[in-house]
Amino acid sequence: MFFGKRLREIRVSRHGLVLKKPLGTLGKFLLVFGFVAILFAPLLPITVRGSAFFNDSAEFCINCHQMNQIYQNWSHSSHRNWAVCADCHVSQKSLVTKLAGKVRDGLNHGYPYLLDSAPDPIRIKKHGALTAMENCLRCHGELVSNFPSHDRKCWECHRGEPHGY
């Protein structure tokens, strides 16, 4: 008799569509929770091992073992007194571009780190190279303002700064 009672609760519209009851409180909660979980799941690597949004320390960047030699070279360079990783590798135009860059880098570096699939050695990509060059000129622009050509990247001549490759 249970099935008979259940069948009587189902209503069908005149077009043949099954009419269901609206979601209850629990159903609405689960729907909203599921949507929020799906929306924020890509940000998971940022929250693992500390917040990448507010952490500008070079020590944070060496969580990945591929960065240990780069960190050692940086820590013996003149840049260690003036700049940490984010000063060169994250856009410094505004707070918005800085946070957007940190989110981008957090996602691009976080997943390979969590999945242990980061390339070794890590190579800078086009966007990262443009950002680093922009930041070189932000600090050293006056020094190179009289150079005849700006077609080359700073690290083409200054190979050892600040990482010492």
Image (cartoon, rainbow, N blue to C red):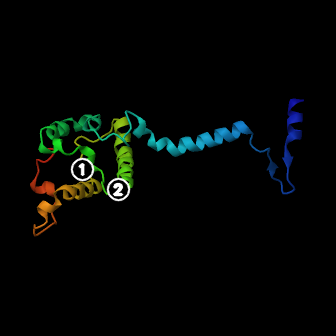
Q: Vertically, is 63 above or below 87?
A: above
Residue located at (70% from left, 36% from top): 26
Distance between the Cα atoms at labels 2 and 1?
A: 14 Å
Please state if 111 lies on the left or on the right of 131 as rendered: right
The quadrant of the rendering that contains the N terminus is: top right
| Three-letter amino acid code at the position of disc 1 | Cys
Q: Secondary structure at mark 1?
A: helix
Mark 1 and mark 2 in contact (Cβ < 8 Å)? Answer: no
Mark 1 packing: few (<14 Cα in 10 Å), some, or many (20+)?
many
Of the image marks 2 and 1, the number of the one nearer the N terminus = 1
Q: Position of residue 42 (x, y in %)?
A: 46, 44
| Three-letter amino acid code at the position of disc 2 | Ser
The quadrant of the rendering that contains the C terminus is: top left
Q: From this viewpoint, is residue 165 visible?
A: no
Q: Which residue is mark 1?
A: 88
Q: Nearer the viewer, residue 115 or 24?
A: 24
Please state if 133 lies on the left or on the right of 78 as rendered: right
Q: Nearer the viewer, mark 2 or mark 1?
A: 2
Q: Secondary structure at mark 2?
A: loop
The tag on residue 6 is none
Residue located at (40% from left, 34% from top): 48
Mark 2 packing: few (<14 Cα in 10 Å), some, or many (20+)?
few
Res. 135 image quadrant? bottom left
Q: Nearer the viewer, residue 159 or 80?
A: 80
Residue located at (15% from left, 66% from top): 150
Please state if 4 lies on the left or on the right of 133 as rendered: right
Q: Vertically, is 32 above or below 126?
A: above
Q: Position of residue 63 (x, y in %)?
A: 29, 34
Q: Position of residue 5 (x, y in %)?
A: 89, 34
Q: Which residue is mark 2?
A: 94
Res. 114 image quadrant? top left
Q: From this viewpoint, is residue 72 visible?
A: yes
